[in-house]
Image: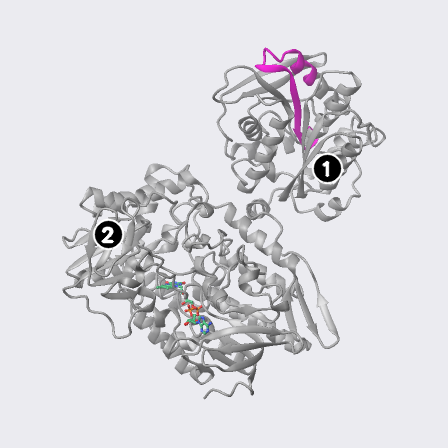
């Protein structure tokens, strides 16, 4: 019974929602002895599986995996009947769980939380409900679902139709009989694809209105796969553990086969196996690079299109059903049972809304520009306002009355997808910024619930009352979420992951794509570091260990992990010859870099002998001369050659449109300081004198270099200035060595673990220059006279020991009146920006470098 508004009920915790998340949250909170109330809009438990009762509704993660794991006894008592269980069976299961743990007594059904306000005086949430009651609680947890807020039917005239209207997400409990009816289905996402074959069985005529063709593979439903059951039977705990630490929440072996390099036979075999298996994570794992590499993705996408063409007999219909406007996997792929086959039935018709958009819904049916359709029933399978819809709709206001809707006007902002700054003691389960919809959600739900429960338990033990993320930690996490998405093909699609299905919704990638395992690791680290990035308060306590949990670019972290796993000896323990051999071997295995128009090798005659060079000329027009960039490779004056920086030189050439001349200067320890610097200057003089022969424009010459190559490039500029020529238009210094002082903070922060270490830097210096020479500006250009030098672009990387000397050089140049562009390679190491074709996140930095190089020269 509802209490009068004047006597609000009080609970430790209120949970909104009684689906998979809310039920398990209630179970855990009860275990902690907290007073809990769950409020649920629906008339019973089940969430998704209460509402989505449309024909054909099933899970699309195998039910052996799409299930709770917190209660081993429950697992023994419940047996799923099929590989992909139906909605009624999953609903039965959730009802069974609720009964088994007596959960219903703490759930108020048919009750929606209509508003939530944070009371700063009381440190309590004040909730109001659709039943008119007011409830106070210390913690408010929204378990309101990622796919629970149906999208409104935003079609002109939607209210006018006189026949029956159904939404797949709000299907009548008594079911619908379409026998003898003319039925329209609008939408071909997951729900449409599941329901269309079954509606077609009953309907006299079925017309499907498709805006976007979707990728779907056959589910091959049937009994649960024997191999999976065997694994579970033999070691259930081990299997569940593996799921928790897998990428998607289902333990599969990630492939290392690359689409681009695999043979046609291997490609076909892997694809056919995945097609036969009928599992989402299988078809998403045909190639390791299909999520990031357009060419690899195209191979899988085209094979699926081939299948569609082989199933659908009418060539025109099959072409309309072939998805061509997005990369495979960038919209949620579907699993189906006889979906494409349905279009071979004589009473089923497909209308392509791209060619024939709906003009309006009428009383009788649907009108497109060319045709009028009469229907007895219209089924909307138009999806959800995903991930944020239910959260924003529930009118939550935190500190200073700022609502979630206001705070998230430009897109959701969360810390770990669990909390958001300004909203103390407010948790979201599977919120935006968590793996949620990209994962087996039961695994993600259990992880979130456990994390929140442990957090509340810890707070109680420590006598703390409030918890709230800091804006710094939250901004860092949001950046990381977007960084993870940016290296994939996902942001290219108009998907609901991007909010693109809801008019006016900000275009932001909503879930965390870094993986369930990586995410769990981050959450665990946050907790074990004393709740890094959270402010916790209690009587007489206000503690905050502020910071950002993930600052490194995800692909850079991956490269470091792979390299650490290779167990290579530290470079500085090797002889120069062995270190060079190691570098050369590594260069064999990397991608070649972009195509350029022409690559030629030659030699530069200098008094000390010939210096080899390699010239890169851009492809395409204009035909005539171009600006020249003389480039010096990295390698600590000891390592490197024309091959070592070849992909980077191609990249610089392609992006800048300049002719790049990469010069191999003499190396230490065979020839020590100042030979490398002298060679660099000699090479610049020679390139200037031979500009026309090299295809360059006389007088338009810049220098560039990476690491020690940037050191000699910077020195060459100083020598050219002192010699009053040649004229240098600009200097591009990528992660330059400009000083021998190793006391700067970046040496302390990044001195170990990021490939270029303090020890290696010392090894380089020892090979190159005597300590007495290291103060010479030809070794340490930071100590030179910087007046009158060419404009500079200096690139520094966050995780580089040399970062601070790069910044120091930029500041010193500016102080000397030199125009400087300081480009920060955020989340990168000393080497990662140069790893063309390997570290995707380096591409935007290199795009900026290309722009800087072009800016050195007058516009063509
Ligand atoms: C058709 C369909 C199939 C799916 N299949 C899969 C699958 O195979 N694998 C997978 O991993 N995921 C699948 N999902 C995603 C699915 O949503 C999750 O797996 C899971 O069921 C989510 O559970 P939940 O408890 O977090 O949210 P939900 O199940 O969505 O429950 C949220 C509940 O909160 C209630 N609620 C919302 N707002 C309020 C409010 N303000 N006050 C009170 N109550 C409120 C809603 O009524 C709802 O009952 C599917 C989703 C759909 C729609």
Query: Is 690 colored magenta in this rendering?
Result: yes
Residue 306 in sight here: yes
Whether the residues at callouts 1 and 2 have beta carbons within 8 Å, the answer is no
Foreground: 792 or 829?
792
Quadrant containing the C terminus in the rendered view: top right
Q: Residues within 10 Å of mark 2 (few under 14, many from 20)?
A: many
Q: Which residues are magenta?
A: 683-709
Residue 314 in the image: state x and y as whole percent.
18, 44
* 767 left or right of 460 in image: right
Quadrant containing the N terminus in the rendered view: bottom left
Q: Is mark 2 within 8 Å of ligand 1?
A: no
Query: Is 42 colored magenta in this rendering?
Result: no
* 626 left or right of 820 in image: left
Which label sits on residue 340?
Answer: 2
| Image quarter for ligand 1 | bottom left
Q: Earlier in the sequence, mark 1 or mark 2?
A: 2
Residue 417 in sight here: no
Look at mark 1 in the image and give the residue it sits on: 806
Residue 574 figure quarter: top right
Residue 751 in the image: state x and y as whole percent.
72, 45
Assign a secondary structure to mark 2: helix
Residue 223 figure quarter: bottom left
Assign a secondary structure to mark 1: helix
Give the Cα separation between the discs numbered 1 and 2: 59 Å
């Amino acid at each position: 019974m509802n209490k009068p508004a004047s006597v609000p009920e009080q609970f430790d915790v209120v949970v909104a929602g009684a689906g998979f998340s809310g039920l398990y949250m209630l179970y855990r909170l009860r275990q902690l002895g907290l007073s809990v109330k769950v409020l649920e809009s629906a008339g019973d438990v089940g969430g998704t599986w209460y509402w989505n009762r449309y024909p054909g509704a099933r899970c699309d993660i195998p039910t052996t995996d799409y299930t709770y794991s917190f209660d081993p006894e429950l697992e023994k008592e419940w047996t799923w009947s099929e590989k992909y269980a139906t909605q009624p069976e999953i609903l039965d299961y959730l009802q069974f769980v609720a009964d088994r743990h007596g959960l219903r007594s703490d759930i108020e059904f048919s009750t929606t939380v209509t508003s939530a306000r944070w009371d700063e005086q009381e440190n309590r949430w004040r909730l109001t409900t659709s039943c008119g009651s007011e409830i106070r609680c210390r913690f408010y947890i929204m378990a309101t679902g990622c796919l629970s807020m149906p999208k409104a039917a935003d079609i002109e005239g939607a209210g006018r139709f006189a026949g029956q209207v159904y939404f797949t997400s709000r299907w009548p409990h008594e079911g619908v009989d379409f026998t003898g009816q003319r039925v329209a289905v609008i939408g071909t996402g997951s729900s449409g694809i599941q329901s269309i074959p079954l509606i077609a069985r009953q309907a006299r005529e079925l017309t499907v209105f498709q805006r976007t063709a979707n990728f779907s593979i056959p589910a091959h439903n049937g009994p649960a796969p024997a191999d999976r059951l065997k694994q579970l039977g033999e070691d259930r705990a081990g299997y569940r553990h593996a799921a928790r630490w897998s990428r998607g929440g289902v333990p599969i072996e990630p492939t290392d086969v690359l689409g681009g390099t695999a043979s046609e036979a291997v490609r076909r075999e892997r694809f056919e196996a995945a097609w036969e298996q009928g599992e989402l994570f299988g078809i998403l794992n045909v190639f390791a690079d299909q999520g990031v590499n357009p060419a690899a993705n195209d191979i899988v996408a085209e094979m699926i299109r081939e299948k569609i063409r082989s199933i659908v007999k009418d060539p025109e219909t099959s072409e309309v059903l072939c998805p061509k406007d997005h990369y495979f996997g960038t919209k949620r792929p579907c699993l189906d049972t006889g979906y494409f086959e349905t279009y071979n039935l004589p009473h089923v018709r497909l209308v392509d809304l791209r060619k024939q958009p709906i003009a309006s819904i009428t009383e009788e049916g649907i009108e497109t520009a060319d045709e009028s359709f009469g229907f007895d029933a219209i089924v909307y399978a138009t999806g959800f306002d995903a991930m944020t819809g239910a959260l924003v709709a529930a009118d939550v206001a935190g500190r200073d009355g700022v609502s979630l809707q206001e705070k998230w006007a430009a897109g959701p902002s969360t810390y770990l997808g669990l909390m958001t700054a300004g909203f103390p003691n407010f948790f979201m389960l599977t919120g935006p910024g968590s793996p949620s919809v990209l994962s087996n959600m039961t695994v993600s739900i259990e992880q979130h619930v456990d994390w929140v429960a442990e957090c509340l338990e810890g707070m109680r033990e420590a006598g703390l009352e409030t918890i709230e993320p800091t804006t710094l930690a939250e901004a860092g996490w949001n950046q990381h979420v977007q960084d993870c998405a940016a290296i994939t093909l996902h942001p290219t699609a108009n998907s609901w992951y991007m909010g693109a299905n809801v008019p006016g919704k900000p275009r932001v990638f909503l879930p965390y794509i870094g993986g369930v395992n990586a995410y769990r690791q981050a959450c665990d680290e946050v907790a074990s570091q004393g709740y890094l990035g959270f402010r916790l308060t209690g009587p007489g306590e206000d503690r905050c260990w502020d910071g950002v949990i993930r600052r490194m670019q995800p692909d850079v972290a991956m490269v470091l992990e792979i390299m650490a796993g290779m167990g290579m000896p530290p470079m500085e323990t090797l002889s120069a010859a062995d270190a060079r051999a190691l570098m050369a071997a590594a260069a064999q295995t990397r991608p070649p870099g972009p195509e350029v128009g022409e690559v030629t090798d030659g030699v530069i005659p200098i008094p000390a002998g010939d210096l080899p060079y390699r010239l890169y000329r851009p492809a395409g027009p204009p035909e005539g001369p171009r600006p020249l960039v003389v480039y010096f490779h990295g390698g600590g004056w000891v390592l490197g050659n024309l091959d070592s920086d070849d992909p980077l030189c191609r990249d610089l050439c392609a992006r800048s449109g300049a002719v790049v001349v990469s010069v191999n200067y003499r190396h230490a320890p065979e020839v020590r300081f100042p030979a490398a610097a002298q060679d660099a200057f000699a090479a610049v003089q020679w390139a200037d004198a031979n500009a026309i022969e090299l295809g360059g424009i006389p007088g338009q010459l810049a220098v560039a270099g990476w690491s020690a190559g940037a050191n000699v490039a910077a020195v060459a500029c100083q020598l050219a200035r002192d010699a009053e020529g040649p004229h240098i238009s600009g200097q591009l210094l990528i992660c330059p060595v400009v000083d021998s002082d190793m006391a700067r903070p970046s040496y302390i922060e990044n001195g170990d673990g990021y490939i270029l270490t303090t020890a290696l830097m010392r090894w380089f210096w020892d090979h190159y220059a005597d300590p007495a020479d290291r103060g010479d500006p030809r070794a340490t250009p930071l100590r030179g006279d910087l007046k009158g030098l060419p404009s500079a672009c200096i690139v520094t990387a966050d995780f580089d020991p040399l970062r601070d000397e790069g910044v120091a050089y930029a500041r010193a140049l500016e102080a000397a009146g030199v125009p400087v562009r300081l480009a920060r390679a955020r989340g990168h190491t000393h080497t990662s920006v140069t790893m063309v074709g390997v570290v995707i996140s380096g591409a935007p930095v290199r795009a900026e470098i290309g722009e800087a190089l072009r800016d050195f020269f007058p516009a063509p």
